């Protein structure tokens, strides 16, 4: 049995961090205009990528839980480095930390390209200002990459006074707070699709599956919202409100595209 009781608040907070690890599961839809046979490729990439990522996270996260005592693990800043130091020799954890840095740089590179492409696509569809849709002579959305890079750097500077772990936790909660409304709206949209497809006379098994997914998605989004805490939730609202002037401006200029 666990040495400490499991509290609902701690589970909610953990669910928020867990959701951060899975943010971007819809990323395969962003480069749809540049993908061969997107109607077939994108669903496969999304489902297979999400399942594989979840499986890897589950297996890897289990290792320190099984090898390190609970109290030590709770106070560890680098659990995997601790595992390597203890079972592979002192100092080996430093090399693992190096690979973590390389992995982080790879993730940063991927997100930079993804967000730039997303911004370019939105601008090309009239949702963002037209200059963000321009490509340089190599076909890269240079202006979009620059703007999103500056905004991302500003988010990092917001937590400069915190420790590395605290800063990462804070940013992960803010980013999750900014994305949760989108996932919640998608789950609610599934309810609408469920009603429409049920009215159209589709198979009951299909509609039941859609209803179940919508129900689970909505419940998890609300559960994670409660676990965010006050500060990340408010900052998420501030980020959403910061985009309203641009949204209203673009709606006045191109109402058909924005609506």
Image (cartoon, helix red, strand yellow):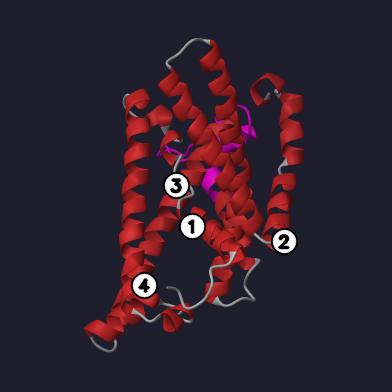
Place of residue 183 in the rendered image (x, y in percent of width and height, measured from the top left): 57, 41
Q: Name the residue nearer the viewer: 102 or 82.
A: 82
Comes first in the chain, label 3 or label 2: 3
Comes first in the chain, label 1 or label 3: 1
- Residue 230's disc is 2
Image quarter of residue 259: top right
Instruction: Reply above or below: 195 against 60.
Output: above
Question: What span is in magenta?
Answer: 124-147
Residue farthest to the front, as pictured: 1
Which one is closest to the eye, mark 1 or mark 3? 1
Place of residue 161 in the rendered image (x, y in percent of width and height, measured from the top left): 64, 76
Place of residue 75 in the rendered image (x, y in percent of width and height, measured from the top left): 48, 82
Q: Residues within 10 Å of mark 4 (few under 14, many from 20)?
A: some
Separation (CA) of disc 4 from disc 3: 34 Å
Query: Is residue 92 left or right of 176 when viewed as pictured?
Result: left
Pointers 4 and 3 in contact (C-beta within 8 Å): no
Query: Is residue 230 left or right of 122 when viewed as pictured?
Result: right
Does 192 appear in magenta? Answer: no
Pointers 3 and 2 in contact (C-beta within 8 Å): no
The residue tagged 3 is 113
Q: Secondary structure at mark 3?
A: helix
Residue farthest to the bottom, as pictured: 90
Does 133 appear in magenta? Answer: yes
Separation (CA) of disc 3 from disc 2: 31 Å
The residue tagged 4 is 65
The residue tagged 1 is 18
Looking at the image, how many numbered discs can be counted on the residues? 4
Q: Secondary structure at mark 4?
A: helix
Q: Name the residue nearer the viewer: 161 or 18.
A: 18
Pointers 1 and 2 in contact (C-beta within 8 Å): no
Image quarter of residue 2: bottom left
At x 24%, y 83%, the residue is 87
């Amino acid at each position: 049995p666990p040495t400490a009781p499991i509290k609902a608040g701690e589970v909610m907070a953990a669910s928020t961090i867990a959701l951060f690890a899975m943010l971007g599961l819809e990323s395969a839809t962003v480069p749809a205009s540049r993908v061969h046979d997107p109607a077939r490729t994108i669903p496969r990439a999304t489902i297979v990528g999400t399942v594989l990522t979840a499986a890897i996270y589950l297996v890897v996260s289990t290792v320190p839980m099984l090898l390190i005592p609970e109290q030590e693990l709770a106070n560890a800043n680098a659990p995997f480095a601790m595992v390597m130091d203890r079972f592979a020799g002192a100092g080996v954890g430093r090399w693992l930390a190096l690979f973590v840095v390389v992995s982080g740089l790879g993730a940063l590179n991927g997100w930079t390209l993804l967000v730039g492409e997303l911004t370019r696509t939105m601008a090309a569809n009239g949702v963002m200002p037209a200059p963000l849709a321009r490509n340089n002579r190599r076909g890269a959305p240079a202006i979009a990459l620059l703007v999103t890079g500056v905004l991302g750097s500003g988010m990092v500077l917001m937590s400069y006074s915190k420790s590395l772990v605290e800063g990462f936790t804070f940013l992960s909660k803010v980013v999750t707070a900014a994305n949760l409304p989108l996932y919640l709206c998608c789950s609610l949209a599934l309810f609408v699709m469920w009603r429409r497809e049920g009215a159209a006379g589709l198979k009951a098994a299909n509609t039941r599956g859609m209803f179940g997914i919508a129900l689970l998605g909505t419940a998890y989004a609300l559960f994670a919202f409660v676990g965010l805490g006050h500060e990340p939730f408010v900052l998420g609202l501030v980020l959403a409100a910061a985009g309203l002037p641009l949204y209203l401006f673009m709606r006045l200029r191109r109402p058909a595209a924005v609506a």
